[in-house]
């Protein structure tokens, strides 16, 4: 039986967290509350990027789709994250070449490029107002990292034909981010950033227009398979379909142990300052790009549409968020931007994402009628959106891209479900110490 602990440990049932994103979201109304047994062609569990994209693309292929969301669409990591739409996979191409060979690594690069393209195309096709802006700046916090970053930018240009990236030296970096914390890096103008909750809500509206029946406050307790798939919703009602898509990511928990052995939830946190004004905003991030740095426990940040600093930093590996998220994240921000010491922090929120051992997403056909994609490891805005389209293709019988992703080896966490948390805490403590050295 599924115990929905991550779904209830830190948030109010059926309500968005008190985040900047929720405060600035475009109002969307009219999603139903599940109150009776229904049937359909495909059941989708999870109202984030994976589930919404799956449902939308399935409906466009002519399937009758029911989507079940435990709280509200975009409630989980899809509506709380840093909003960065990055290039490539979570692992760099030279690592993937060693892991899988050059040919398969190139296929993964192509799929990653498609993941950025689908985000941009969905925004345009459905008129989604989500503050899309181009550019992600990779910032190296150790001088010794810069050479590797520059070599990797050269590799992408020379071997993969990717001409949207360029090298950044120390002087230009300081001008671009208004901080002495970094030593150089690279700028990727083929990547970008957006308001993730408004993007998720836009996908939900598009899916509903395409005919998807979206039910909020429909927490799933279990599913069974046979001639069909039967999904039981809290309260005893059921949805019966021919196929099932699991789009739960960090909130999968005990619903599917065969996935949970390889995909583990962790918590990450973001703060938003007061609006800083145009002059201060340009001093902090001159070109209004997003920034992600080289720390293992990464700092990621950008400016909002109203010139707030949205700064993400710090992780925890238990069920519960820190009691004071603002105070937890602020030191990470001040390490980079001491000039923000007196800036008021208006919002602080947390969310649960999912990682894998090797930080590559985990695509699997769990059973003949059940598909799953999760474990995006902080690289999920674009990849989760594409995962939905890929699983919709798989349901319809086109397995080519699904098989490429499913063939990535993703090991189980050592110790199984019972020991994976304490072992992860030990590992992350070591990496956090390494960041400080």
Image (cartoon, rainbow, N blue to C red):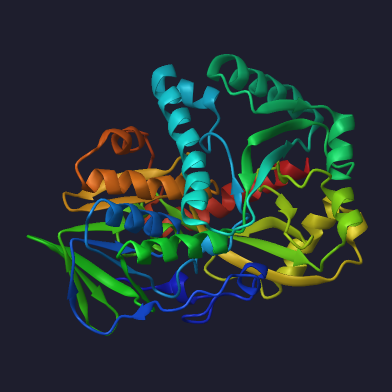
Q: Is residue 26 positioned above or below 114 on the image?
A: below
Q: Residue at left 19%, top 79%?
A: 37
Residue 91 on image: x %, y %: 53, 34
Residue 330, image quadrant: bottom right
Q: Is residue 207 visible?
A: yes
Residue 278 on image: x %, y %: 87, 57
Could you say which is closer to the camera, residue 341 or residue 428?
Answer: 341
The count of marks equals 0
Q: Is residue 80 positioned above or below 337 on the image?
A: below
Q: Is residue 362 positioned above or below 322 on the image?
A: above
Quadrant of image for the N terminus = bottom left
Quadrant of image for the C terminus = top right
Residue 170 lies left or right of residue 79; in this view the side is right
Q: Residue at left 53%, top 26%?
A: 93
- Most distant residue in the top direction: 158
Residue 280, image quadrant: bottom right
Residue 354 on image: x %, y %: 48, 54
- Most distant residue in the left direction: 227
Q: Is residue 382 visible?
A: no
Q: Is residue 35 positioned above or below 88 on the image?
A: below
Q: Residue at left 91%, top 54%?
A: 279
Could you say which is closer to the camera, residue 86 or residue 427?
Answer: 86
Residue 12 lies left or right of residue 34; in this view the side is right
Residue 79 lies left or right of residue 208; in this view the side is right
Q: Residue at left 68%, top 57%?
A: 314
Residue 16 on image: x %, y %: 55, 75
Could you say which is closer to the camera, residue 249 or residue 203?
Answer: 203
């Amino acid at each position: 039986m599924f115990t929905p602990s991550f779904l209830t440990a830190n948030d109010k049932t059926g309500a968005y967290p008190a985040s900047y994103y929720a405060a600035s979201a475009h109002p969307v109304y009219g999603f139903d509350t599940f109150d009776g047994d229904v049937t359909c062609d495909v059941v989708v569990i999870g109202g984030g990027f994976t589930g919404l994209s799956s449902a939308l693309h399935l409906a466009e292929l002519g399937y009758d789709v029911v989507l079940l969301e435990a709280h509200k669409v975009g409630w989980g990591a899809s509506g709380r994250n840093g909003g960065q739409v990055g290039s490539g996979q979570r692992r760099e191409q030279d690592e993937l070449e060693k892991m899988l060979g050059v040919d398969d690594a190139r296929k993964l690069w192509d799929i990653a490029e498609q993941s950025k393209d689908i985000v941009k195309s969905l925004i345009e096709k459905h008129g989604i107002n989500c503050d899309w802006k181009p550019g992600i700046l990779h910032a190296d916090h150790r001088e010794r990292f810069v050479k590797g970053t520059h070599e990797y930018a050269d590799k992408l240009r020379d071997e993969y034909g990717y001409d949207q990236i360029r090298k950044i030296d120390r002087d230009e970096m300081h001008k671009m981010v208004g901080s002495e914390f970094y030593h150089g890096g690279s700028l990727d103008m083929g990547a970008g950033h957006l308001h993730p909750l408004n993007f998720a809500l836009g996908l939900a509206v598009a899916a509903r227009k395409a005919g998807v029946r979206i039910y909020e406050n429909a927490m799933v307790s279990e599913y069974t398979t046979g001639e069909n798939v039967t999904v039981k919703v809290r309260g005893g009602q059921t949805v019966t379909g021919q196929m099932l898509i699991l789009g739960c990511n960090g909130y999968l928990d005990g619903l599917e142990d065969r996935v949970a052995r390889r995909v583990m939830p962790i918590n990450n946190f973001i703060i938003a300052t007061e609006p800083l004004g145009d002059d201060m905003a340009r001093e902090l991030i001159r070109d209004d790009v997003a920034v992600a740095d080289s720390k293992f426990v990464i700092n990621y940040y950008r400016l909002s549409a109203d010139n707030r600093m949205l700064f993400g930093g710090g992780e925890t590996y238990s069920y519960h968020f820190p009691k004071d998220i603002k105070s937890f994240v602020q030191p990470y921000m001040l390490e980079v931007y001491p000039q923000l010491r007196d800036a008021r922090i208006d919002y602080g929120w947390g969310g649960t994402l999912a990682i894998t051992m090797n930080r590559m997403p985990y695509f699997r056909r769990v059973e003949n009628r059940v598909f799953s994609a999760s474990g995006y490891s902080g690289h999920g805005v674009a990849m989760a959106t594409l995962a939905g389209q890929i699983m919709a293709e798989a349901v319809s019988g086109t397995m080519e891209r699904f098989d490429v992703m499913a063939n990535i080896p993703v090991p189980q966490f050592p110790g199984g479900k019972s020991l994976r948390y304490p072992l992860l805490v030990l590992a992350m403590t070591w990496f956090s110490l390494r960041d400080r050295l």
